[in-house]
Amino acid sequence: MSRIRGKHTRPEMQIRKLLWHAGFRYRLHGPKLPGRPDVVLPRWRAVILVHGCFWHYHEGCVLFRLPATRTEFWLNKLSGNRERDRRSIRELQERGWRVAIVWECALKVDEARVEQSLTRWLRSDSPAIEVFRDGTEVVNLTASALQ
């Protein structure tokens, strides 16, 4: 597990490329923000969290499969990841940041749709958005509803 990267992953790089080409400028891995969000857009007071479907326990996703060995260990680990995500999102929103979650599976299906969703969200006043594989997006979420 030591070789698994936490930063500069392929999905994160895709999001950064999409944002850059759409004209948005950003910072990376906000070290002073809860959860160290993947992309920070200070001008828009927004952060984007790029969630890998396995590591963030995306239930019902075709990219998520619970390992057959040490199932209890993995359930505890992945559930802990989800709880930590919720805590970070709640703290970010309490500090006045808008939060977007983009799932890895959504990028695999349609990058253009993800770009449109993020662009529309950034230019709106909506506090949060979550982009899914099936093309749906949930807007105006609270920390408890996210994930």
Image (cartoon, rainbow, N blue to C red):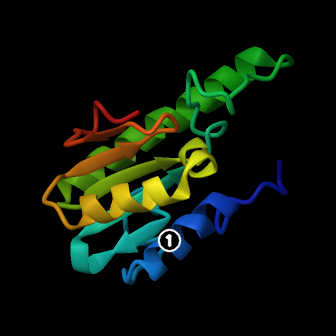
Q: As rendered, which of 51 and 116 lies closer to the eye?
A: 116
Give how far across and how far down residue 64 sits, in percent: 68, 29
> In the image, what residue occupies the spot 52% across and 38% down?
133
| Neighbours of disc 1 within 10 Å: few (<14), some (14-19), many (20+) | some
Quadrant in which residue 72 is drawn: top right
Q: How many marks?
A: 1
The residue type indicated by label 1 comes to Leu
Identify the residue shown where x is 43% and y is 72%. Answer: 30
- The location of residue 117, given as percent across then percent down, is 35, 55
Q: Is residue 8 left or right of residue 114?
A: right
Quick check: 53 above or below 98? Answer: above
Residue 109 vertical position relative to residue 28 in the rendered view, above or below: above
Q: Quadrant of residue 119?
A: bottom left
Relative horizontal placement of residue 70, taking residue 75 as reference (left or right): right
Q: Residue at x 37, y 43 (%)?
A: 130
**Frontmost residue, 107 versus 59:** 107
Q: Nearer the viewer, residue 129 or 87?
A: 129
Q: Position of residue 105 (x, y in %)?
A: 60, 42
Q: Secondary structure at mark 1?
A: helix
- Residue assigned mark 1: 18
| Left or right: 61 in relation to 4 | left
Above or below — where is 48 with respect to 82? Answer: below
Q: Residue furthest left?
A: 125
Q: Quadrant of the C terminus?
A: top left
Observer-nearest of 117 and 99: 117
